[in-house]
Image (tube, rainbow, N blue to C red):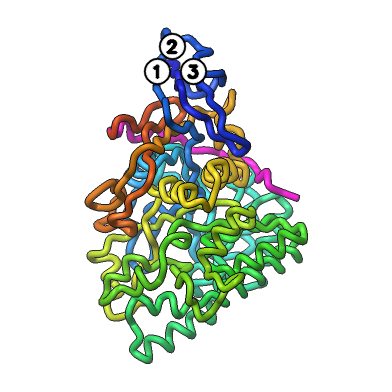
């Protein structure tokens, strides 16, 4: 069936233009001035007064991820359905190889979890938790044969996912040989573990100590070290995940100034939430916001004072404006409060790390537009177009253009959305990190490859509609 989206304003990275969008089957076939196409014979979606944007792409999710003795509460079915409600039409999830595991077996396991379950399209990054001769060979095989062209390494979580500098260098050298992207969880996990042990021994066990024992200088130090290793490995493309700290961002900005292939993402929780109002809540409630890297203090972080006395949040927004930060993702890794987060009662180190956010990224970053932190064009760029280009999906994804997949969101700026269990909430969680937040704007209509998933506050999608996306190499290389 053909679809015509009329009377809307199409937002791209370069402007906002009144255009109609013609879709035939799964593909965008043409753009035209308002009224250029006849409405006869088409399913018509009237976007008067609304923005028409490419579907959101969340390149950092963890559906069904085992962590800390439990498993992330969203399955690929529930998580991708929630994503659709949030205007996200593609995710790239993390297949996990722990230390001692087999890379290809673990990728196959993630395919089994996702196949036939997803409401939207999906791809995979591969976590390499054990760097050895076989996993290095497997990296090359995945790039050449599986459409998996990015690999995540960890400088944290010793004994589970941690790689030392020598292992990281070898993995980076292998990535350089095959053109792959290295993604890095940049925190000094060895030092963090010492601080955690000392805090617990003192009896400092409340959730807020999760943040205090992961201070921003240890994020900045690890970021710097990863950048140096990537340079030694031949300027291999390096992408720092979930950046939370201004001093870490300074390391990325300096590297980019020198022409290095270094990029970074941040997440809504670091742009909007503060330690004081989340992990710092009385009692154990702060466990809801335990994630790594941690939510930080806004203005009075003793570990870092940003430019002109501003804190981390101001520097991160500045980084998004200046393209020091390339992408906004979510690091969606949801756990219920009851029975999961409660595993850390009496010891913050046992709280499963993760916040659920895949449903709300487009909404929350649009708030940056409303607040004057970003332009409409930059909203689309950081949430859709750059993720597609960074991870080998452009121009199939991430743009409204003839020949691209008809992944389209109609966004209504004229109303509001209330987030939370008592509002808009479709993730498989018993709480929301954003409970009670009122957002300017609303996801009005969502199409995935031409199929309407969300319209008139109804979910019209089907389990299994989503297809696996075989990704090419990154288009962000210097």
In percent of width and height, residue 398 lies at 55, 37
Identify the residue at horizontal 66%, vertical 51% (top origin): 180
Using the image, determine if residue 32 lies above or below residue 372: above
Separation of marks 3 and 1 at Cα, in angstroms? 12 Å
- Pointer 1 and pointer 2: residues touching (CB < 8 Å)? yes
> Between 188 and 367, which is closer to the camera in this rendering?
367
Q: Which residue is mark 2?
A: 39
Q: Which residue is mark 3?
A: 24
Q: Quick one: label 3 or label 1, which is nearer the N terminus?
A: 3
Q: Which residues are magenta?
A: 458-478
Q: Is residue 387 magenta?
A: no
| Residue 378 location, quadrant | top right
Identify the residue at horizontal 50%, vertical 64% (top origin): 313
Q: Is residue 336 left or right of residue 62?
A: left
In percent of width and height, residue 419 lies at 31, 50
Separation of marks 3 and 2 at Cα, in angstroms? 13 Å
In percent of width and height, residue 232 lies at 76, 66
């Amino acid at each position: 069936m053909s679809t015509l989206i009329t009377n809307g304003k199409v937002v791209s990275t370069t402007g906002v233009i009144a255009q109609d969008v013609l879709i035939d089957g799964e593909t965008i076939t043409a753009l035209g001035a308002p009224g250029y196409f006849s409405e006869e014979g088409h399913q018509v979606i009237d976007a008067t007064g609304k923005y028409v944007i490419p579907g959101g792409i969340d390149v950092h999710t963890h559906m069904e991820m085992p962590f800390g003795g439990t498993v992330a509460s969203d399955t690929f079915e529930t998580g991708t359905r929630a994503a659709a409600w949030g205007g996200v039409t593609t995710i790239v999830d993390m297949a996990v190889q722990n230390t001692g595991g087999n890379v290809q077996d673990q990728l196959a396991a993630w395919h089994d979890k996702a196949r036939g379950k997803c409401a939207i399209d999906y791809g995979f990054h591969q976590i390499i938790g054990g760097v050895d001769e076989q996993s290095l060979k497997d990296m090359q095989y995945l790039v050449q044969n599986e459409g998996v062209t990015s690999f995540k390494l960890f400088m944290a979580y010793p004994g589970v996912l941690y790689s030392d500098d020598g292992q990281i260098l070898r993995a980076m050298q292998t990535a350089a040989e095959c053109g792959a992207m290295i993604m890095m969880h940049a925190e000094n996990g060895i030092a963090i573990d010492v601080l955690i042990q000392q805090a617990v021994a003192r009896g400092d066990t409340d959730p807020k100590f999760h943040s205090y024992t992961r201070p921003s200088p240890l994020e900045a130090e690890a970021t710097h070290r990863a950048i140096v290793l990537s340079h030694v490995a031949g300027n291999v493309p390096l992408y720092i995940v979930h950046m939370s700290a201004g001093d870490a961002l300074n390391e990325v900005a300096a590297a980019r100034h020198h022409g290095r292939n270094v990029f970074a993402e941040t997440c809504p929780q670091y742009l909007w939430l503060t330690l004081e109002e989340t992990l710092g809540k009385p009692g154990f409630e702060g466990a809801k916001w335990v994630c790594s890297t941690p939510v930080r203090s806004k203005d009075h972080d003793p570990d870092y004072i940003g430019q002109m006395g501003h804190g981390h949040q101001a520097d991160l927004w500045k980084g998004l404006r200046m393209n020091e930060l390339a992408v906004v993702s979510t690091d969606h890794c949801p756990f219920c409060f009851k029975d999961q987060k409660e595993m850390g009662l009496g010891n913050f180190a046992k709280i499963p790390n993760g916040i659920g956010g895949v449903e709300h990224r487009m909404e929350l970053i649009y708030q940056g537009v409303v607040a004057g932190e970003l332009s409409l064009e930059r909203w689309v760029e950081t949430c859709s177009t750059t993720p597609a280009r960074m991870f080998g999906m452009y121009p199939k994804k991430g743009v409204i253009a003839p020949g691209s997949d008809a992944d389209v969101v109609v966004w209504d700026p004229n109303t509001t959305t209330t987030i939370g269990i008592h509002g808009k909430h479709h993730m498989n969680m018993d709480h929301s990190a954003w409970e009670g937040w009122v957002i300017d704007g609303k996801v009005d209509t969502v199409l995935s490859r031409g199929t309407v998933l969300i319209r008139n506050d109804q979910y019209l999608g089907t389990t299994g509609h989503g297809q696996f996306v075989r990704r090419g190499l990154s288009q962000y290389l210097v």
